[in-house]
Image: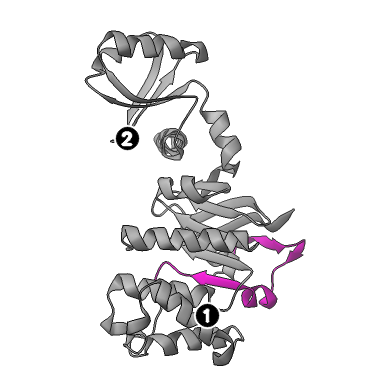
Amino acid sequence: MYSLEIKNLTKTFGKITAVDHASFEVPDGSIFGIIGRNGAGKTTTLRMMMGIYLPDEGDVILKGVKIGQEFKSRVGYLPEERGLYKKMKVIDTLYYFAEIKGKSKKEVHKKAEEYLKRFELYDRRLSKIEDLSKGNQQKVQFIATILHNPDFIILDEPFSGLDPVNTNLLKDIILEMKQQGKVIIFSTHLMDFAEKLCDHIAMIDHGKIILKGSLKEIKAKYSQRNVSLTYEGDISFLNGNPIIEKIENFGNTTGIRLKEANHTQQLLKLLVDNNIIVKKFDANDISLQEIFIELAGSEEENLKKEVANV
C-alpha cells in the first residue's frame, strides 16, 4: 500500500525546468530517499510535496486523495535552509513550533526535554539560538520537526553539517520512527547514507526521475557482473583485460564490471596470481554510488548529444 503517490510533478522557473514530470510511490512504513547531485531537483520536489511551491503540473496523492491542509498537520518538515528565530531561546523555539502544529507546551514538555538530553542540548535549553553552533542549531530544528509526533517526516539534506556522533544519533532516531510506523522521506546527495537507511529510492538527475523502486531489487538488478573489491597492491594490469568491462575507483573500494557473470572466479585468480592482497571480494555487489554514476553519466552523455544537435 502506498502512503504517497507523486504523479507527474513539474516545476519551471523561467526557462529552467527544475522538475520534469517526476513520478514515484512511497510505500507505507518505509524510509524513502530522493537522491541525486546538488541542483538535481530534490528540494524543489520536496517543496511541491509540502505545498510550498505549486506545481505547474502534477499531483501529490495521500491514500488516494489529493493532499490538502490536513496533510500539513500530519507532517514534520526539515527544510534545507534552516529557519530558526535567532533571538529565541532553544526551549521556547521547540514549544513555538509544536504549537504551530496544534500541540500545547504541556503536551510536548516531557518529550522536548528527552530529545534535548539525547542530543546533549539540555544544558543549552535556555540559550538563544544565535549562541549555538550551526550543528547544534540543526539539532534543535530536527527536534522541532519531530516533536509534535507527525505521521510523515520529510527531511531535506538532514545530515548536512553534523559530526559523525550526531549523524549516528540522527540515524538511530530515524530508524526508531520507522519502527513506530511513520513514513520518512529524505533527500540527500550522499549515496552511502541513502544506501544504509533507505528501503526505497527515487533517483533524480536534471529534474528527471532516472531510477525508482525498492533499493534491494535495484541493487540485485545492477549488481550482476559486478565485483566490489578492497585490496592492497597495483591492479593496473587489469586495464584492457578482455574479461573487464569497466573499473571504477571509489577510494576505499573499487567497483569492477565484468563482461560476463561467469568471469568472477577468473578475476579472483588473476588478482591472487598477481600477488594482490584481497581484503574484500564481493561478487554480485554494487554500491548505490556506482549505480548513480553509471546512470547519471549516461544522462550527461545524452544531454551533450542533445545540445550538439540543437
Measured along the vertical axis of the image, is residue 289 above or below residue 183? above
State the SS at label 1: helix
Tell me: 270 left or right of 294. Answer: left
Q: Residue most toward the left? A: 234
Task: Tell me the residue at 30%/72% (across/down).
Answer: 134
Magenta span has 6?
no
Residue placed under numbered mark 1 in the picture: 111
Which amino acid lies under the numbered mark 2 shown in the image of this protein? Phe
Tell me: 130 left or right of 35. Answer: left
Percent from the top left, x then y, of residue 205?
47, 46
The label on residue 250 is 2
Quick check: can you spot residue 150? Answer: yes
- In-front residue for pair 157/204: 157
Measured along the vertical axis of the image, is residue 173 above or below residue 264? below
The label on residue 203 is none
Task: Tell me the residue at 60%/86% (across/down).
Answer: 103
Measured along the vertical axis of the image, is residue 105 above or below residue 295? below
Task: Tell me the residue at 36%/9% (across/down).
Answer: 269
Quadrant location, the C terminus: top left
Which amino acid lies under the numbered mark 1 shown in the image of this protein? Lys
State the SS at label 2: loop
Percent from the top left, x then y, of residue 298?
45, 33
Residue range of the region highlighted in magenta in the rendering: 54-82
Percent from the top left, x then y, of residue 9?
61, 57
Tell me whether the residue at label 2 lies in contact with that at label 1, contact meaning CB atoms closer than 8 angstroms. Answer: no
Quick check: can you spot residue 159? Answer: no
Q: Residue most toward the right? A: 64
